[in-house]
Image: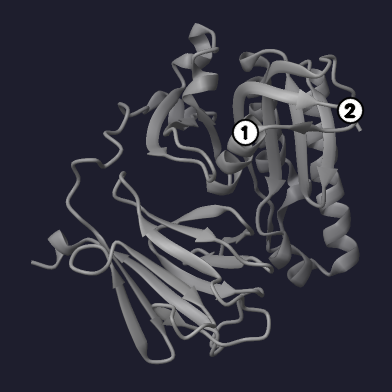
Amino acid sequence: MGTLAAATDSQVVILFADVVGSTQLYESLGDARARETVQQCLAVMREATEQFGGSVIKTIGDEVMATFPLADQSLNAANQMQQRISNHPAFQGEGMHVHIRVGCHFGPVVADARDIYGAAVVTANRMTSQAKAGQILTTAGLVNQLGPEWRKLVRQIDVNTPRGQSDEVAVYEVLWQPEEATSMLPSLDVRMNAAPRRLRLRSNGVEVLVGAGGDSSVTLGRADENDLVVKGSLISRMHARIELSRGNRFVLVDESTNGTFVSEGDGEEHYVRRDSVFLEGSGRICLGRASVPGSSQEILFEVEDPSRDT
């Protein structure tokens, strides 16, 4: 456990980093080797944190939570984590491709001897849950604290409202890979004026559309009053909802006891519990348990652009 230099209330950078797809890692490598691999990743995360002046507050399974006094320190550490894990032979090869995702935010926290609390912690964790494999996401709050070198390597990709908060947060991607930095695109318009899209959901012969002619929000769960009903002992009555955000993106918000697993077309799986994740491309949603292809409980999803249908 790390020790916070701050007392009860302070402004710090909060960073979360976790191993992507650890469930598949255990399935493909076996328990012993997968556990060892995850522990090696956690060691890299801890070393990078301490090397750049941060403190590891705690580790939770395959995730590290850390704090930094300065924004630049946090991105130096995040970059080090990504570089070492994506390029080290120990984490690649023999059918094994280990990736991590990182999210961070700058803001006030309430601290005690062993943990930190507050809306800023929730926002930092939200950045991590939205990040894809090999990605670093952060907020305008942190970008505003950056020095000129790192500030040149961020681009805005979205705007959203963290769960339980009323204010929108601008989301930035940190371009840590050399090829990304040299071909950096201008900040996106966060799709506010993009052509409307739709999300197609299919389960047990039932099809539901969200957006572009369908509802802007649908609910999923085992209760019959849901828009898409999926029965199962691990599925909550009102398990999750999917909404079309102001940024013209589809977000799944879990409200369940056991969480939701979202598997994308490339095999990457996200686990969310009382949190949210964006849906892109196509894949599977499984309520309450890890996704099993062909299961009667799985929900197939596909994000479609109607402008391409003509």
Amino acid on which the number 2 mark rests in the picture: Gly
Closest to the camera, between mark 2 and mark 1, is 1
Q: Measuring 42% from the left and 34% from the top, which residue is drawn there? A: 168
Q: Measuring 76% from the left and 30% from the top, which residue is drawn there? A: 66
Which percent across, then down, holds residue 155? Answer: 40, 27
Which percent across, then down, holds residue 264? Answer: 49, 64
Q: Earlier in the sequence, mark 2 or mark 1?
A: 2
Q: Quick one: which residue is furthest to the front in this view?
A: 225
Q: Which residue is mark 1?
A: 119
Determine whether the residue tagged by mark 2 lies in a helix, strand or loop. Answer: loop
Nearer-the-camera pick, 127 or 217: 217
**151 w.r.t. 272: above or below:** above
Q: Quadrant of residue 5?
A: top right
Q: Measuring 58% from the left and 36% from the top, which residue is drawn there? A: 123
Q: Residues within 10 Å of mark 1 (few under 14, many from 20)?
A: some
Which percent across, then down, holds residue 302? Answer: 35, 69
Q: Measuring 60% from the left and 67% from the top, which residue is drawn there? A: 260
**Which quadrant is the C terminus positioned in?**
bottom left
Q: Quadrant of residue 110?
A: top right
Q: Which residue is mark 2?
A: 2
Tell me how far mark 2 sits from mark 1, CA to CA. Answer: 20 Å
Nearer-the-camera pick, 285 or 96: 285
Amino acid on which the number 1 mark rests in the picture: Ala
Q: Residues within 10 Å of mark 2 (few under 14, many from 20)?
A: some
**Which quadrant is the N terminus positioned in?**
top right
Q: Quadrant of residue 46?
A: top right
Nearer-the-camera pick, 240 or 130: 240
Dot 2 and dot 1 residues touching (CB under 8 Å): no
